Every structure is written in structure tokens, then in C-alpha cells.
Amino acid sequence: MRELELPDVQDVMLEYRKIKLLYRSALKEIGTKLEILNDEFKLVHQYNPIEHIKTRIKTPDSIVKKLKRYGHETSIENMVRYVNDIAGVRLICSFTSDIYRLAEMIGNQSDLKVLSIKDYIKNPKESGYKSYHMLVSVPIFLSDSVVDTKVEIQIRTIAMDFWASLEHKIYYKFEGNAPEYISKDLQECAKMVSELDDKMLSLNEAIQECIAQQDKDQIQMNDVCRDVLGNNKEYKDSKVQEKVTEIVT
């Protein structure tokens, strides 16, 4: 009976390092794009839509656990095929309106392909989790090939990120089996976070309207001043002309 040939450990590790290189490179590509978009937005609109950018690559343990949870064997091929969030980027914004603005800007990048979108803001998870997820692929140009590499982009407000971080820590301590009363309290906190985001967005819109009205009033005042000064100039010119005529005659 022929013995089953197992892959050499060194070959597997080398393949894993190559794949990890792709994901690190993909994060660099996405990070550069986001910084450029943020700088452009600041230049044009005098406003930064991105508060923070966080990146991470899943650990081997996390990848293996996710493959087992999905019912797949542990292999490099299955890792690339079935685990979509190995490379992750998290964008933290001030307001919910920034989330959809950024998502549109990212989707308009010609060299990025949007593979899927999950809007947990309009459709929150049962736990209360809110975030906007985009799965994109970015081409990585190697010396002898071009490899499309998947990156998950999560976009959320500061308040959403605060809630999600605490929720993750709490459930991690209970290994996913938190008491029911804690789950209910987290849901209540999620409602409070949502109300806070709505209130801050309304406040920001009110501030922007106030600034726009002040700018409008300033423009009108400048126009009035210009008219008054113009009329005074015409009056003075007429008086000078009368004086010259009087002297000549």
C-alpha cells in the first residue's frame, strides 16, 4: 500500500509567507489610497472624513479556527479561498454620513474591485453591532505576476468602534457565551450609541447650516458696502467736476 504523501512543513511555511506578503502589500496599497483620498477631501472641503485608520492581518490561530468553524480543512488554498478577512482595514469616522461618502469614494477607484458589501448600519446584527463592510480585491504587482488579493474594509463611527471593541472584549472573556443579561445590556448600549451618532450628525448639520448662513450674510454685507462705496465715489466725482467747471468759467 502506497503511503500518503504529506506536504513538507518547510514548503507550507514558505507558501504561507508568500501569501502573507501579498496581504501585507494589499494593506499598503489600500492604506496609500485612503490617505490620498483623505488629503484630497481635506484640500477641497477643508474637512477630514477619516479620524483613524487601523490595519491588521489575522493570526494563523484565528485563520485555523475560522476554517474549522466553516467546516473546511486547514490548508493554504482553503485559507485564501474561504477566509475573506485575513487582511483587514478599519476606517473610523466622525459621522455616519462620512461612512457612505467614503464607501462611494472607495468604490469609484478604478483599480479596486468591490466583491461584496454588508451594511450593518441599516441592518444591524442582533447583538446591536453596526458597521459598514466592503470586501474588495486589489491587484498586487509582483516581479513575474499580478495577484488579485482580498481585503475587508470596515467603516464605522467613533461611537460604533467604541461599542464594538468593548463587545469583543466582553464576549472574548466569556468565550462567546456571555450571560443573557449582559447581552441585553449591550443591546441597550448599542441603542444609546445609535442615538448619540444621530444627535451628533444633526448637530454637525446645524453647525454647517449656520456657517453657510454666516458666509451668505457676509457676502451680502460686502455687496452692500461695495454699492455704498461706489455711490460715494460717484458723488465725489460729480462734486469735483462741478468745482473744475466753476473755476474754468
Image (cartoon, rainbow, N blue to C red):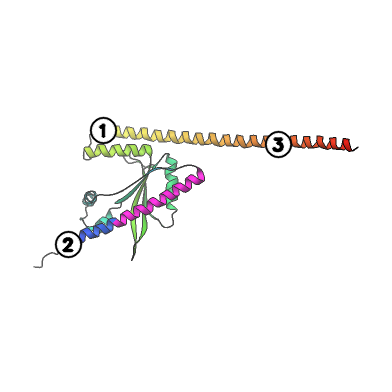
Magenta span main SS: helix
Res 81 seen here:
no
Residue 227, disc: 3
Label 3 is placed on what type of residue?
Asp
10 Å neighbourhood of mark 2: few (<14), some, or many (≥20)? few
Residue 130 is situated, as x and y percent measured from the top left of the image, at: 35, 41
10 Å neighbourhood of mark 3: few (<14), some, or many (≥20)? few
Label 1 is placed on what type of residue?
Ile
Classify mark 3: helix, strand or loop: helix
Residue 212 is situated, as x and y percent measured from the top left of the image, at: 55, 37
Residue 8, disc: 2
x 27%, y 35%: residue: 183
x 27%, y 40%: residue: 168
**Which is more N-terminal, label 2 or label 1?**
2
How far is mark 1 from mark 3, CA to CA? 67 Å
On the image, which quarter does residue 242 sit in? top right
Classify mark 2: helix, strand or loop: loop
Residue 126 is situated, as x and y percent measured from the top left of the image, at: 31, 39
On the image, which quarter does residue 128 sit in? top left
How far is mark 1 from mark 2, CA to CA? 47 Å
Image position of 153 with respect to 19: above or below: above
10 Å neighbourhood of mark 1: few (<14), some, or many (≥20)? few
Residue sitting nearer the eye, 180 or 171? 171
Q: Is residue 243 left or right of residue 24?
A: right
Label 2 is placed on what type of residue?
Asp
Q: Residue furthest bottom?
A: 2
